[in-house]
């Protein structure tokens, strides 16, 4: 069995709470976060009554109550300019619901309370430690990057508490709902891909040099600028015709705008993307993954760097593999050979 039972990635409220729940039950835990230290701000206004119950159970409630206070009344501004005051709903405590109101407390104080309690169990956050790759089978192997270098860690469970843009969810391929699909070129193929994305619950955006909001809407997408397409897409898929104007459409500057967690899909033509810039973006993890069916030189040379990058899924230009297309290709080939035989027989 791997030496670590649970590796928790992310020391926000979710990761800290999970770690505390596990260590108090004697489970061996390693808790990492890529930040340089504790979060010093607050995205949350306060703690809901049910969470206060959990904090009570975890032994951090007193600390959290002391760090915060009751919510002030809300000021409601109406269209007519009038202002009214409305208090937060407060219910009397009952046995079933012992905390009848939320508690206003700044997020970093909550996180500090959880960290202090964790320290009492000998568990400390390992800061500046980033998980950047995961493989899973019988156990999980995670690659961690820190100031000390890269470390490969084996654990029984990996708990992804790494926030909204989760690297782990990305690596294990969990779901598209809520992700943004960027379609570069909304023609016949791009339009069909946009429909597939929408079926998977993705938000579909598109750009091409002559795109209009109306044409995009007809294809079930939203027209955006090129910069927005690059910076907002979780999956960017290219469906453009190669021409002198579109050659190198995505170069180093464009790839630099993409999310580090993004996936680039190119099934159109290799030279639409500057291949050297793409290799560099993938090597430096400027973008997370590329799925490529097309290359500058095909077949891709045996010693090409794209062949050895683990964040590339490469296929040998097989995007056209479909029964109907094969019927056309092979039918045309047989016709061409027949015609050649006829011409040769004529001498
Ligand atoms: C505008 C806004 C308002 C909100 N208001 C409230 C509110 O009033 N009340 C409330 O309860 N909640 C509120 N929330 C939600 C709450 O702040 C968040 O849900 C909470 O921070 C989520 O906690 P988390 O632990 O899941 O993720 P995060 O706090 O995002 O923590 C994730 C951690 O994972 C780390 N990480 C990410 N990737 C890696 C990696 N590859 N390797 C190592 N570490 C990694 C990050 O550095 C981060 O520290 C609000 C959120 C927003 C955005």
Image (tube, rainbow, N blue to C red):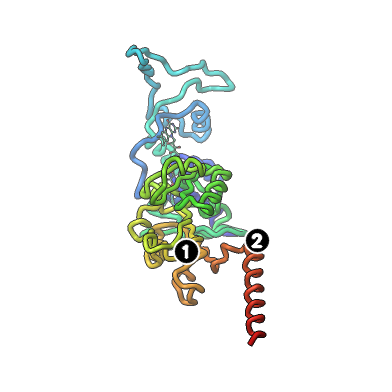
Question: Mark 1 packing: few (<14 Cα in 10 Å), some, or many (20+)?
Answer: some
State the residue at coordinates (33%, 40%).
40
Residue 149 visible at all: no
**Ligand 1 closer than 8 Å to label 2 CB:** no
Extreme residue in the bottom direction: 347
Q: Is 301 placed above or below 177 here?
A: below
**270 and 15: which one is in front?**
270
Query: Could you tell me if the residues under marks 2 and 1 are in contact, i.e. CB atoms within 8 Å?
Result: no
Q: Residue at x 58, y 20 (%)?
A: 95
Q: Secondary structure at mark 2?
A: helix
From the image, tell me which residue sits under label 2. 324
Label 2 crowding class (10 Å Cα cut-off): few <14, some 14-19, many 20+? Answer: few
**Rounded to the nearest whole Å, what is the CA distance between mark 2 and mark 1?**
21 Å
State which quadrant residue 145 falls in.
bottom left
**Residue 52 place in picture, x, y as percent:** 49, 29
| 212 or 62, nearer to the observer | 212
Disc 1 under 8 Å from ligand 1? The reply is: no
| Residue 205 visible in the picture | yes
Q: Which mark is residue 269?
A: 1
Q: Residue at x 54, y 69 (%)?
A: 316
Q: Quadrant of ligand 1?
A: top left
Rendered location of residue 324, percent (x, y):
65, 61
Q: Specify the label residue 153 is tagged with.
A: none
């Amino acid at each position: 069995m791997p030496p670590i039972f649970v590796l928790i990635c992310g020391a926000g409220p979710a990761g800290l709470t999970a770690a505390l729940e596990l260590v108090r039950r004697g489970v061996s835990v390693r808790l990492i976060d890529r930040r340089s230290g504790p979060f010093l701000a607050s995205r949350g206004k306060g703690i809901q009554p049910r969470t206060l119950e959990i904090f009570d159970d975890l032994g951090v409630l007193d600390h959290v109550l002391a760090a915060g206070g009751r919510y002030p009344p809300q000021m409601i501004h109406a269209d007519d300019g009038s202002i009214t005051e409305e208090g937060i709903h407060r219910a009397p405590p009952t046995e079933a619901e012992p905390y009848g109101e939320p508690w206003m407390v700044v997020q970093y104080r909550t996180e500090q309370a959880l960290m202090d309690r964790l320290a009492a169990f000998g568990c400390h956050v390992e800061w500046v430690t980033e998980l950047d790759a995961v493989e899973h089978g019988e156990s999980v192997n995670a690659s961690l990057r820190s100031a000390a270098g890269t470390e490969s860690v084996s654990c029984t469970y990996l708990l992804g508490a790494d926030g909204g843009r989760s690297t782990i969810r990305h690596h294990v391929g969990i779901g598209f709902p809520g992700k943004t699909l960027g379609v570069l070129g909304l023609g016949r193929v791009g339009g069909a891909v946009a429909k597939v994305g929408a079926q998977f619950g993705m938000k579909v955006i598109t750009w091409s040099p002559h795109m209009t909001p109306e044409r995009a809407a007809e294809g079930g997408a939203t027209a955006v600028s090129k910069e927005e397409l690059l910076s907002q897409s979780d999956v960017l898929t290219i469906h453009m015709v190669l021409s002198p104007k579109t050659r190198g459409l995505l170069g180093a500057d464009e790839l630099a705008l993409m999310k580090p967690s993004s996936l680039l899909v190119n099934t159109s033509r290799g030279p639409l993307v500057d291949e050297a810039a793409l290799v560099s973006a993938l090597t430096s993890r400027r973008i997370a993954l590329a799925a490529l069916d097309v290359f500058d030189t095909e077949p891709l040379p045996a010693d090409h760097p794209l062949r050895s990058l683990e964040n590339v899924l490469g296929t040998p230009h097989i995007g056209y593999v479909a029964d109907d297309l094969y019927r056309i290709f092979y039918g045309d080939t047989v016709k061409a050979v027949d015609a050649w035989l006829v011409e040769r027989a004529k001498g």
